[in-house]
Each structure stands twice: as C-alpha cells, then as structure tokens.
Image (spheres, rainbow, N blue to C red):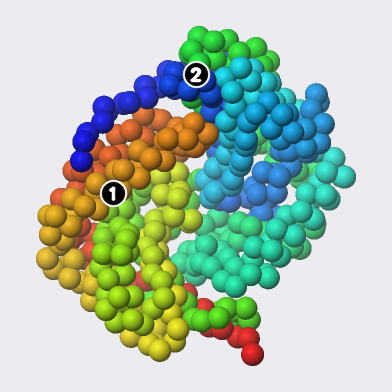
Amino acid sequence: MPTRPKHAHPVERTVLGNGLKVLVVPDRTVPLVGVAVVYNVGFRSEPEGRTGFAHLFEHMMFQGSAHVGKMEHGRLVESAGGRMNGHTLPDLTAYYEALPASALELALFLEADRMASLSVSEENLRNQVDVVKEEIRVNVLNRPYGGFPWILLPALAFTSYPNAHNGYGDFTHLEEATVGESEDFYATFYSPANAVLAVVGDCAADEVFALAERYFGSIRRRRVPKRGPWPEPRPSTDLHRVVRDPLAPQPAFAVGYRTTDPVGDLDRYLIYDVLASLLAGGDSSRLRARLIYRDNNVTDVSCQLGTFGDDAFFVRDPTLLQVIVFHPGTATTSTLLQAIDEEIGRLAEDGPDRQELARVVNTSSADLWRSLDSLMDRAHIFASVETVHGRAELVEELASRLAAVKVADVAEAASDLLSQHRAVLELQPAGN
C-alpha cells in the first residue's frame, strides 16, 4: 500500500486567553471549510439522577442564543450552502459543519454565540425533553434491537454509574430536569476552556486565529470541571444477562471484553483494534468466514471497539471490545460462544499469518485516511482527538502505528481475551 506523508495536514494551533484551544488545518484543494467545536463532556459526565443530560444538551444547543433565534443556526448554515451535524459520546459532545470558505465567519459567529449565551428557558427545556423522549421511542422502544448493545452491554460489563448508566436517558430523569440544573450543566461544561475549535480547509491560520479572537475571545473564562477518570477493575467472575425484545425477529447476543487504556496505553490498544478486524472486519475475517459462510448458523457477526464502533479513538478508559452476533436460533448461544473462543484461541496460539495481518492493517489504514476525505468529518475528528488525547496530530500517525503491530502482539491480545471474565448479553425475541 502506498505510504502517505506522516502529517499530510499539518496542524497550527493557539490558545485564547479564556482557554479555548483553536486548531487550524489548511487545505486549499477546494473552496470549502469544515468547522467543529468539541466539548469535553459526554455520557460519563452526567450527574446521577439525570441520565441523558449530555444528549439533551446536544439538542438544547440549537434552541437559540442572544443573537440567533430558535433553530436559526441550522437554517443559516443551510442557506449559506452548508450542512451540519452533531453527536454525543461517552467522553465528548461534538458540533460540526461544512460550508463555503466565504461563510467561515458566519460559522464562527454562530458557534461563539451559543457558547456565550444559550437560551436555557423552561419552554426550550420542556420542548427538547419531549424531542429526546420521542427520539428514544423511535430508536429504542419501537425498533427491533433498539439500544442493543450500546445501552445494555455497558450496564452489564461495568459497575460504576459513569460507565454503566444509560446515556440516552431515563424518561423520569429527563422529565424531572429543571431550568436551574440545565443552567448549571451549561455553565459547568460549555465553557471555552472545556472546548476545542477546529477549522480545516480553505483558510489561513492567521485569519482563523483573528476571527476566533473576535468572536470567542470575549467569552468569560470559567473553571474547567474535574471529572474522571473512572477506572474499574476487570470483572472477577463471568457476567451474563438475558433481555427480552418483543420486536426482535431472531436472537442475538453481545460479548464484552476489556481492553487496555485507549489513551494511556495507545499502542497496545491499537493491537485490539487489529484483533477486532481479524475477528470480524470483513467477509474473509475469522468469525464471519466460519459462522456465516462455513457453519451457516449466524446471519451477522461484527466486532468493534468503543461504544458505537466509530468512536474507538475518541474514548477513554474503561472501554470494551465487543463481539455482536445475530442468529436464527438453530445454534445455542453457548455453542456459538464456544466457536468464538475457538477462533480467538487459534489467534492466541499461532497469531495471524503475515499476509492476513498485512491485509487487515492496510484496510484499517485506508479506512482511517478515507475518514478524513470529508472536511466536516476531518474537523470533528481532529477536534475530538485533541480533546481526548491532547494531540490532534495523532490522527495521521495512527496508520503507521497500526503498521507496527506484530503477529506476536496479536497473539498476546487474543490470549488476554481468553483469560478474561467476559460480559455476555443475550437478547431473546419475546413477540408472538
């Protein structure tokens, strides 16, 4: 596979007087810019009794501010020819957009206005609580396999509230939220020193730094909250739970294994990323080749790091390597778990062959580079990695660090999985 420069997109940075980190990644190939603001707050930062607060605030941030009306942020971005999105993860909340380069100043004004003066009113809060509840109904309560396994598996695999609770939110907790609590959450976490602003694309660093100072510089500096870390010892016994899903057409199960620290021990963590791909990263992977195409007893099997699979490099410790299986019930969960153990055992004993390892590493590296093609995605990825790891440059070093993974490293990581007490979440259909 052709190699790319270590830093194809060099990062230029500054820190404003109020603590806001500003990253600029120039790219003159197209007349567009990607803008992202990532806040160091996610599911794990939610106070007890207020599950879903981080996700609720992802919605609240579009409800208007001192100089921007309710839902005007999105309309202004779209009318300028742009698009936008946002998401909430265990360790961060991200807002990002792509626009013509001529609209850069508009994007920075909009982000600064809601950072400085969000409209946290009773009307807006009640409205967005209802919106989030409806989202939960659509995505979890009224959908087959809703919330499986991202809500249910952490609740089994972990014991502490930050790591184990439902980040989507409990209806009672959401309904009981007050304006005062919302204002406190906003003041605590939505501050300049708790955020990273990234601008990528057709721009110059000096221009962006000047605009950032103009629009963000006057926002009052506030103390950065001390939250986490939330380490947990590995389970001392196997964990198992069965849940019933009235809408599921067939059984499923998810297995959770602990990994090393994604931030403090990144190079070892990357070995688990390679292991996940070897197990179920494509049709020629170990589990998919055996369970789907040889044994014909599962309809799908996947393997991922992190909560959602696309957040593997935006997550802090502790986190999971997950094996997720959907099957028609012709084989029992225990039979399928035994097959998974056998395939992991083969990797533990012999490791992958060098050609297999090279294929997986090359595919993962290509996926990493491809994720940076979109300016909007590039902005939020750089800002997210800066937030969690403290070095956005790490984004473009991951491919070479993956290439350093050796056969013996994979065998050692596979042995670690086999030695663990794992969490097994079983889902059974409960319909007529």
Residue 105 rendering spot, x and y as whole percentages: 64, 17
Badge number at residue 202:
2
Q: How many marks?
A: 2
Badge 2 crowding class, 10 Å Cα cut-off, few under 14, some 14 to 19, many 20 or more, is many
User: Which residue is at a point 46% across and 67% down the rendered structure image?
Assistant: 157
Q: Is residue 242 above or below residue 32?
A: below
Give the quadrant of residue 215.
top right
Q: Quadrant of the N terminus?
A: top left
Residue 178 visible: no
Can residue 313 be seen in this snapshot?
A: yes
Q: Amino acid at mark 1?
A: Thr
* Image side of residue 412 versus residue 94, left or right: left
Q: Which mark is residue 109?
A: none
Give the structural element (helix, strand or loop) at label 2: loop
The residue depicted at 71 percent of the width and 45 percent of the height is: 59
Q: Which image quadrant for residue 291?
A: bottom left
41 w.r.t. 275: above or below: above
- Which residue shows up at 29% across the image and 82% down it? 295
Q: Which mark is residue 363?
A: 1
Which quarter of the image is occupied by the C terminus?
Answer: bottom right
Q: Residue at x 76, y 45 (%)?
A: 181
- Label 1 – label 2 distance at C-alpha: 29 Å
What's the amino acid at mark 2?
Answer: Asp
